[in-house]
Image (cartoon, helix red, strand yellow):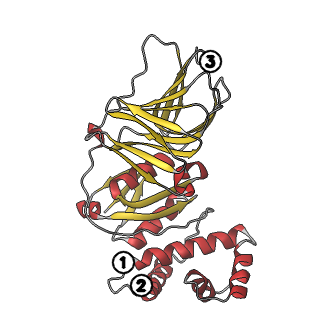
Amino acid sequence: MGEDTLLKYIKDELTGEEKQTVVSWINKSEKNRQRYAVLKAEYTASGFNSQALDVEKAYRKVRKSGKRKQRNRKIRSGIAVAAIGLLGYFFFFTRETNISNTIVPESMAMVTVVTPKGASKDIVLPDGTHVVLNADSELNYSKTFNDDVREVYLYGEAYFDVVRDTTRPFIVHADDMSIKVLGTSFNVRSYSEDSEIQTTLVHGSVEIQGTYISPVRLEPLQTASLGKSDKQLEIKSVSREEAAPWKEGKLIFRETPLENVLEDLERKYDVLFEVRSDGLYEYLYTGTFDNLSIDEVLRVLKISSPITYRKEGQKIILD
């Protein structure tokens, strides 16, 4: 299918019948889906670099330049739906100063499950609760887990699908936040590098509590964020897609500072970034990486902002 037709589909300029033809073509093969996804990512990202907001002109310029520089480059399999925006101002790395406060009682005989960067793990707890542990995370629970209270201790990020048991509450301890449930599905994020602890309820009911907050109940598709420094709790609504996108291989950013984007990329792809241009920290990014390879991620980042990069083993240098 021609590029012009795909662009018209992206810009919503086709008739209903023409749209159906494009949809059928996209779903016909993985190669077609990938071509469309990368095309849309490049087109959307190019718009954020156009001072005149002439997205079409900016896109054509990017495509012409890209073909000269990357004519023989093959794109690895994966689907990209990415729109990377540049906005605002941000700050420098401070990850070495952040230390998690989640403390596992020393008296307990514990079971520990750890995931490295670049990997996730499915876990079934003794009560049948299903946990998906994200990359660079750790989950601890007592060998007496099936007693009166079901408690786990989380460092990092995990999605919980809790087996309902009205006689034994299920409690997740994550830094300064504890999440108490009977039976529900929810996501908890508490990486030591993050500035806040987040709990997102998918369905059911959870109660958020902690040293610095009064008990609060969440409604489905609400996220509670507790600031680690100011101890302020913020509750907001999210879409179902945003509840736990990492479970589906996605990374979703909404005006996210470059530092946080790179931290998530490091966990997902098991790479290390080194930023040598302080100006890059002035960018905020908005968009979705949907099962994208690290090479495709870098390609879209380069389109959307003045980033150049090179690889040195597992390290990626950004200038």
**Does the CB distance between marks 2 and 3 fall below 8 Å?**
no
Of callouts 2 and 3, which one flags the residue occurring earlier in the amino acid sequence? 2
Q: Is residue 252 above or below residue 188?
A: below
Instruction: Identify the disc placed on residue 58.
Output: 2
Q: Residues within 10 Å of mark 3 (few under 14, many from 20)?
A: few
* Residue at screen point 70% across, 67% down: 30
Q: Which residue is mark 3?
A: 146
274 to 54, vertically: above or below:
above
Q: Is residue 234 left or right of residue 237?
A: left
Amino acid, disc 2 = Ala
Cα distance in 3D space between marks 2 and 3: 59 Å
Quick one: label 1, few (<14), some, or many (20+) residues within 10 Å?
A: many
Q: Nearer the viewer, residue 73 or 118?
A: 118
The quarter in which the N terminus is drawn is bottom right
Q: Position of residue 61 (x, y in %)?
A: 43, 85
In front: mark 1 or mark 3? 3
